[in-house]
């Protein structure tokens, strides 16, 4: 009987490294960790444009030369006459172009496109990147971004720094005509949930656009990392300040709407086109990706913002 321990005996069989050469490795498509669900573009109502310009005509309110008659006997009174005045300088929104060019070596795409098509994967990831930028621009653009175009009368300051139910109620008082959704950074939503837990009023959940969200007063809180915390998507520290928006969406509701160019050549999705630019002398195939977008606020009371919300307050619930 051998005295050599079983664990130390040499294995008289094909080794792992050699066997690995004959194995088919199961692979994933390229994974892009920076991608988000982009809920804003799912829940915001969009309108397609014919020529890339959207004019918001408004009535001059507060000084309208119009009166009406309210009487049971119109024979005893003269029906007043008048008209509704329109603004002579309405705002026009022009679509913003978000573009990029993708280059693919045709030799690489010819030889290494199984099981995943190299051109398709490159274009697919580029499209996702453009849509991430679109959501960021819809919120933060200096020209048409929602955060930069809230009317002065629609700004709210938090009562205690952190987001409490009273603060969201104040936003609702500003956007009381059929509010559609709150929009906030995930950490702001978590901070609000902590405040609700602390007060014993946990929010209910609702299903919107295929996702499940908490709701306050029946209005869902939609998450986005494009409403930055201290100017960052993913802040390192526990504390920080951000903003929370309340939005009414829909043209028929005189709300906030997204804009895009309809019927683009080589249209891949809403407002997005992918054009083949040709192959150069080095065999490099080139593709132009363009996404056209903007947003319009049709009435001042369609949006309000809770500013400088602190997201770093935590509690020991056992001591409450």
Image (cartoon, rainbow, N blue to C red):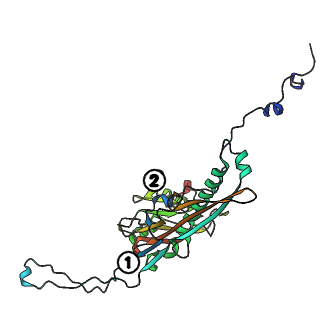
Residue 305, position as x, y percentages in the image: 48, 71
Answer above or below: position of 111 versus 167. Answer: above
The quadrant in which the N terminus is found is top right
Residue 262, position as x, y percentages in the image: 46, 63
The mark tally for this picture is: 2
Residue 282, position as x, y percentages in the image: 76, 58
* Numbered disc 2: secondary structure: loop
Answer above or below: position of 109 versus 75. Answer: above
User: How far is disc 1 from disc 2 in space, using C-alphas?
Assistant: 30 Å
Q: Can residue 148 be seen in this view?
A: yes
Q: Which residue is drawn at 47% across and 75% down?
A: 93
Residue placed under numbered mark 1 in the picture: 57
Q: Is residue 63 left or right of residue 256?
A: left
- Mark sitting earlier along the chain (1/2): 1
Q: Few, some or many C-alpha atoms within 10 Å of disc 1 (few <14, some 14-19, many ≥20)?
A: some
Q: Residue at x 39, y 65 (%)?
A: 250
| Closest to the observer, 172 or 117 | 117
Marker disc for residue 153 = none
Q: Is residue 158 visible?
A: no
Q: In this view, does 16 lie to the left or right of 123?
A: right
| Closest to the observer, 162 or 27 | 27
Corner quadrant of residue 72: bottom left
Answer above or below: position of 60 versus 271. Answer: below
Answer above or below: position of 82 versus 187. Answer: below
* Closer to the eye: label 1 or 2: 1
Q: Few, some or many C-alpha atoms within 10 Å of disc 2 (few <14, some 14-19, many ≥20)?
A: few
* Numbered disc 1: secondary structure: loop
Residue placed under numbered mark 2 in the picture: 209
Q: Which residue is drawn at 44% across and 57% down?
A: 215
| Closest to the observer, 165 or 71 | 71
């Amino acid at each position: 009987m051998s005295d050599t321990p079983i664990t130390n005996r040499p294995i008289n069989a094909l080794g792992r490294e050699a066997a690995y050469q004959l194995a088919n490795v199961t692979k994933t498509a390229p994974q892009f960790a920076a991608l988000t669900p982009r809920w804003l573009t799912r829940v915001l109502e969009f309108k397609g444009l014919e020529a890339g310009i959207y004019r918001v005509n408004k009535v001059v309110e507060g000084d309208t030369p119009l009166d009406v008659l309210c009487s049971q006997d119109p024979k005893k009174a003269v029906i007043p006459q008048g008209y509704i005045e329109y603004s002579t300088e309405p705002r026009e929104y022009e679509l913003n172009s978000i573009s990029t060019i993708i280059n693919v070596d045709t030799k690489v795409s010819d030889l290494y496109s199984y099981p995943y098509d190299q051109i398709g994967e490159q274009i697919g990831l580029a499209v996702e990147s453009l849509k991430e930028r679109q959501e960021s621009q819809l919120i933060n653009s200096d020209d048409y971004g929602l955060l930069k175009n809230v009317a002065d009368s629609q700004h709210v300051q938090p009562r205690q720094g952190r987001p409490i139910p009273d603060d969201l109620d104040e936003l609702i008082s500003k956007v009381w005509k059929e509010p559609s959704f709150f929009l906030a950074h995930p950490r702001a939503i978590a901070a609000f949930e902590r405040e609700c837990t602390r007060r014993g009023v946990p929010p209910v959940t609702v299903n919107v656009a295929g996702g499940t969200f908490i709701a306050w007063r029946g209005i869902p809180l939609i998450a986005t990392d494009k409403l930055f915390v201290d100017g960052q998507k993913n802040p390192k520290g526990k504390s920080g300040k951000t903003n929370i928006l309340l939005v009414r969406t829909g043209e028929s509701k005189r709300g906030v709407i997204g804009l895009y160019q309809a019927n683009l050549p080589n249209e891949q999705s809403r407002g997005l086109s992918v054009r083949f630019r040709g192959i150069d002398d080095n065999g490099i195939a080139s593709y132009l990706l363009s996404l056209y977008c903007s947003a319009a606020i049709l009435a001042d009371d369609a949006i309000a913002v809770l500013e400088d919300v602190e997201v770093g307050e935590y509690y020991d619930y056992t001591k409450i």
